[in-house]
Amino acid sequence: MWDFSGQVVVVIGGSSGINRAIAEAFASAGAKLAVASRNRNKVDATVKALRELGADATGFCADVRDPEALERGLAEAAERFGKFDVVVSGAAGNFPALASAMSSNAFKSVVDIDLLGTFHVMRAVEPYLTQPGASLINISAPQAQLAMAGQAHVCAAKAGVDMLTRCLALEWGGRGLRVNSVMPGPVDGTEGMRRLAPSAELSEQVRQSVPLKRLGQTSDIAHACLFLSSPWASFINGVVLPVDGGWSLGGVSSLGPVLEQALASGKR
Ligand code: NAP
Ligand code: COA
């Protein structure tokens, strides 16, 4: 349905789960791909999978908390492919923990990865963006909009990510760069879901709280990223797009008390 032939797509945090599915969807649509994350084996396996889909693909290792490592990897990707048409920034960390049980470093680690890391990615890709025309997508989460017990660090960090999206959409819009957030709902078979709803029972409870009565698939999120980066979305800038079956209308709030009870009783 979508044709990204010849376009260059960069996915940071692209070596597993939702972000890897996004990279694979762009590869299947004809794009050239550069993916990055911390773990060499995960990056190599992803590059291999992208090549098997027919894409020209490369990868590099970088922690988004390390701007120099990002800059080095991105410079190599630009050297190989030229300007970037699409950038997806999705590296994130999460663990359920009540605020009173979190050290300063625990809170900071998630803020550093999700929020400061997103800023590092946006700053580092800027010199290499196709201008006008590039689409930048930050991966958010429902915690950005709805407070949730056991998720103070993630709520604060992802709310910051969405505000960064809006500020960059303002600052860079005049250069023809579009910056948007995609906010996935609960996505089946992902690390994020395993951490927040580790049992089959909890996962079912989450499913029931989604108005569409199903969990998301990684492809649901990937399709939204393809749309946002396509000419059909050329006037969409600075939005936070929930791709969540309506979960953010209220159902998401049911997870907080469950997490809080499990954490307070020492089960998590
Ligand atoms: P995941 O499989 O753990 O994906 C995280 C990716 O980021 C991996 O490729 C990981 O690879 C990389 N990463 C983690 N820390 C990094 C760092 N410091 N520097 C560079 N790369 C790093 O998780 P997921 O569940 O698919 O989540 C993907 C995105 O969707 C996240 O932004 C998450 O907040 C968002 N989200 C997920 C859900 C859900 O239901 N799963 C719901 C809402 C939002 P390495 O380990 O190799 O670094
Ligand atoms: N409860 C409370 N604190 C926790 C915790 C938990 N469940 N898990 C980790 N922490 C604390 C650690 O104790 C440490 O704090 P300290 O130095 O005061 O002891 C701090 O968080 C950082 O932990 P560390 O393991 O050193 O960080 P890291 O940089 O190696 O890893 C994480 C970052 C913790 C976010 C790790 O879970 C990660 O890499 N996650 C990526 C994958 C992921 O979360 N996917 C889902 C995306 S939605």
Image (cartoon, rainbow, N blue to C red):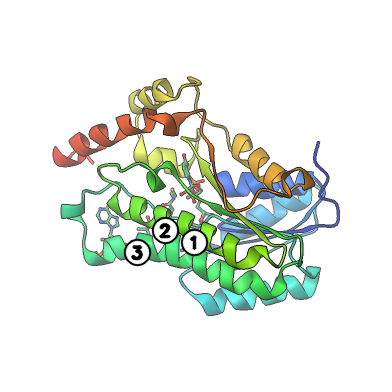
Residue picked out by circle 1:
164
Tag 3: amino acid: Ser
The furthest residue to the right: 6
Q: Which residue is mark 3?
A: 109
Graded by Cα atoms within 10 Å as few (under 14), some (14 to 19) or many (20 or more), the crowding at tag 2 reads many
Closer-to-camera residue (41/92): 92
Eye-nearest disc, 3 or 1: 1
Is disc 2 placed on a helix, strand or loop? helix
Q: Residues within 10 Å of mark 3 (few under 14, many from 20)?
A: some
In which quadrant is the C terminus drawn?
top left
Instruction: Name the residue type under label 2.
Output: Gly
Foreground of the two, 123 or 264: 123
Check disc 1 and give the amino acid type: Leu
Residue under the image location 71 percent in, 42 percent down: 227
Q: Provide the secondary structure element on which disc 1 rests.
A: helix
Q: Quadrant of residue 57?
A: bottom right
Asked if residue 107 can be seen in this view, the reply is: yes
Q: Are marks 3 and 1 in contact (CB under 8 Å)?
A: no
- 135 with respect to 107 (left or right): right
Return the residue at label 2. 160
Q: Position of residue 22 (x, y in %)?
A: 64, 46
Q: Which mark is residue 26?
A: none
Q: In the picture provided, is 107 more to the left or to the right than 204?
A: left
Q: Are marks 2 and 1 in contact (CB under 8 Å)?
A: yes
Residue 149, image x, y percentages: 25, 42
Q: Nearer the viewer, mark 2 or mark 3?
A: 2
Q: Is residue 62 visible?
A: no
